[in-house]
Image (cartoon, rainbow, N blue to C red):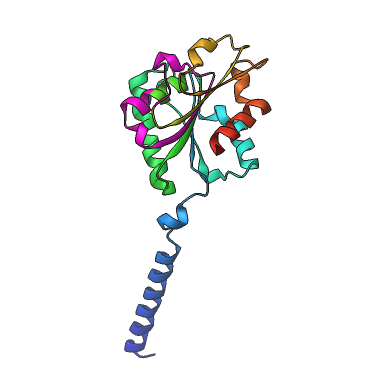
Amino acid sequence: MKKSKILTLFFISLAMVFTLSVYLQPSKVQAATANTPVVFVHGLTGSDSNFYFIERYLQGQGWSNDELYSIDLPSKQGHQELNSIAIQGFVDDVLEETGSDKVNIVAHSMGGANSLYYILNKGGSAKVDKLVTLGGANRLTTSAAPAGIDTTSIYSTSDYIVNPSLSILSGADNIRIYGVSHIGLLNSYQVNGHIKAALQN
């Protein structure tokens, strides 16, 4: 085969590979999710694995794995500044990855206080659509739901770790339940139903 034909075939092949690689790159539109992405924020001594059962439940209700994100906070003692900065970066990454304008946050225990601190002090008010707290130590940060954010606080009268009075926020949809422990809030069909309703409201 002549050298010119070999070069021609080489450049045609190269062009095809380049075109195919560009075609397969996900665009912002292709990456955009059907549901608002959910960011899960754990509490004291917790981890990103704490929300396993809630994530599985939401997947069964129509959320995809690409719409559910759990952060592992740097301070297991709930340090507001450290954790709010981590949440800030994590949310920005989720927005970039999904192409969404906002996220919803589901937070447990001290994660509620950390999430509220992020919303009120680290620019989260422009990036969060809905906030759902589970036995949240919310009043360690504020006594009122952040303006412009649909806030739901789910708390249990059987919670002996975070006093229910710390969870209630003025202006939030405060949902009181019975017979569920603080850790049990992470694995309760009753709570899951309230989470789904809050996210879809």
Residue 167 picture location, percent across and down: 50, 16
Above-or-below relation of 179 to 199: above
Counting the numbered discs, the total is 0
Residue 53 picture location, percent across and down: 62, 31
In the displayed orientation, state which residue is furthest to the bottom. 2
Q: In this view, does 197 lie to the left or right of 113?
A: right
Does the magenta run of residues contain 8? no
Q: Relative to the observer, which residue lies in front, 82 or 181?
A: 181
Residue 4 picture location, percent across and down: 32, 88
Q: In this view, does 128 lie to the left or right of 136?
A: left
Q: Which residue is at 39% across, 17% downward? A: 142
Q: In which quarter of the image is the N terminus?
A: bottom left
Residue 120 picture location, percent across and down: 34, 25
Q: Can residue 179 be seen in this view?
A: yes
Q: Quadrant of residue 181?
A: top right
Q: Relative to the observer, which residue lies in front, 46 or 184?
A: 184
Q: Can residue 74 be seen in this view?
A: no
Q: Which residue is at 38% across, 69% downward? A: 18
Q: In which quarter of the image is the C terminus?
A: top right
Above-or-below relation of 141 to 16: above
Q: Which residue is at 51% across, 43% downward? A: 67
Q: Which residue is at 55% across, 32% downward? A: 198
Does the magenta run of residues contain 133? yes
Q: Quadrant of residue 143?
A: top left
Segment colored magenta: 117-146
In the displayed orientation, state which residue is furthest to the front. 171
